[in-house]
Image: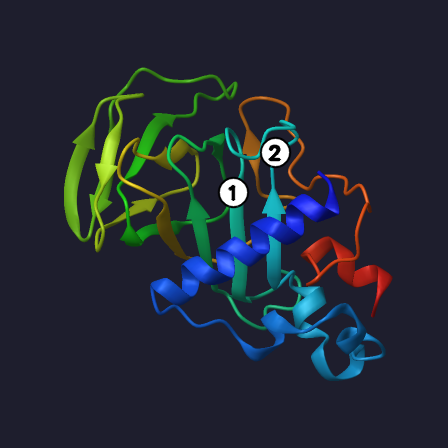
Amino acid sequence: MKRSEVNSIIADAKLFFEQHQFLLPEWAYWAPKNWRNMYNSCFEIPDNNLGWDITDFGSGSFEKRGLVLFTIRNGNWEKKDKMYCEKIMIAGENQETPLHYHWNKTEDIINRGGGNLVIELYKAKSDDTLSDEPVVVSIDGVIRTIKAGEPFIIKPGSSICLKPGVYHRFYGEAGKGKVLIGEVSMVNDDTNDNRFYEVIGRFPEIDEDFEPIHLLVNDYKNYL
């Protein structure tokens, strides 16, 4: 992805968050220069990958396959400092987050507002292929059985609890607008706890055609 594209996506995301009155931490708006020599006072942010995370999953087409994420709080499995995570995300209409599951993380995916979120679920077999068995999930505390691969709509205000080993794919429903998505989960580890069904690039390589307006989680090492 080009840095100019990332900058534009972040600018649009900030407006969308403001429209839905979702406020980010103060450091979300820092310029790159504000991060210089700050590690000793804010090590939790880079160590636990808090902050802006823009990905096209290696697709080269963010609008079709991509996601805006901002990790607000997160722990660390090794330090055991916190055992929870919170994210806010944005998915566009038909903008896919590809099929994946987690080995360790249980998570609630929450529609915080905007359009409808469509999610498709499969149980993972022992060889990581897709099972055709129905998936039993909790929707806001109510147990539901969903057919494998059947699109299921999460409306604003509703949430779904996903256990380890459940493949999930999601996107905004066409014609309903962008979706503000919350995540509340156990510790998030995007390096070691994601099993994508396809081979994808979780963190994109950035073509530095422009200066960053804000740092991504994978930029910290170059500034702190």
The three-letter code of the residue at mark 1 reads Leu
The three-letter code of the residue at mark 2 reads Phe
Q: Position of residue 34 (x, y in %)?
A: 76, 77
Mark found first going from the N terminus, 2 or 1? 2
Camera-side residue: 163 or 148? 148
Marks 2 and 1 close (CB-CB < 8 Å): yes
Camera-side residue: 110 or 112? 112
Residue at position x 39%, y 34% in the image: 170
Secondary structure at numbered mark 1: strand
Instruction: Give the residue at mark 1.
Output: 67
Instruction: Give the residue at mark 2.
Output: 57
Q: Label 2 crowding class (10 Å Cα cut-off): few <14, some 14-19, many 20+?
A: many
Point out the image quarter for the C terminus. Answer: bottom right
Residue at position x 68%, y 57% in the image: 217
Q: Position of residue 197 (x, y in %)?
A: 53, 23
Q: Decide: is 49 above or below 169.
A: below
Left or right? Give the position of 221 relative to 189: right
Is residue 54 in view from this perspective?
A: yes
